Amino acid sequence: MLNKVDKNQKRKERHYSIRNKITGTPERPRLNVFKSSKHIYAQVIDDATGKTLVSASTLDKELKDKAAELSKSEAAALVGKTLGERAKNNGINAVVFDRGGYLYHGRVKLLADGARESGLEF
């Protein structure tokens, strides 16, 4: 009998591999991405202190109504743009991008492009 490959388990293995190579510092925190089938979440994390500095998702109070009207790809770009603006307001200019084991394609790429549009460097 054939065993079905668990795609999420493979993604988690890729994510652990990525996390062994990158860390967020106070000068250059880590921008982490997680996506579910309906929503996308992003947060800027300082790994030295273990604290989330800024976050944004399609479930935020400010974005929930806007994101419901948009496609998932457009909502991802909106989340990236919002996250970038919030980071700039908190004095964060540069981040390390952690794609969370996902391919840099589709919603993940649009989120990153939205963050870059609002002025984040990575």
Image (cartoon, rainbow, N blue to C red):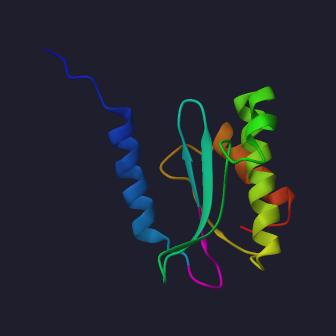
**x, y percentage for residue 46?**
55, 76
The residue furthest top is 1
Classify residue 108 by image quadrant. Answer: top right
| Residue 21 sits above or below residue 2 on the image | below
Classify residue 25 by image quadrant. Answer: bottom right
Does the segment drawn in magenta span residue 26?
A: yes
Q: Nearer the viewer, residue 115 or 85?
A: 85
**x, y percentage for residue 13?**
34, 50
Total numbered labels: 0
Does the segment drawn in magenta span residue 86?
A: no
Span of residues in magenta:
25-31
Q: Which residue is drawn at 74% across and 59% down?
A: 83
Q: Which of 48 and 108 is in front in this view?
A: 48
**x, y percentage for residue 52?**
57, 69
Q: Main secondary structure of the magenta part?
A: loop
| Residue 44 sits above or below residue 82 on the image | below
| Residue 9 sits above or below residue 31 on the image | above
Q: Quadrant of the N terminus?
A: top left
| Residue 74 sits above or below residue 56 on the image | above
Q: Which residue is drawn at 67% across and 39% down?
A: 107
Q: Which residue is drawn at 60% across and 48% down?
A: 41
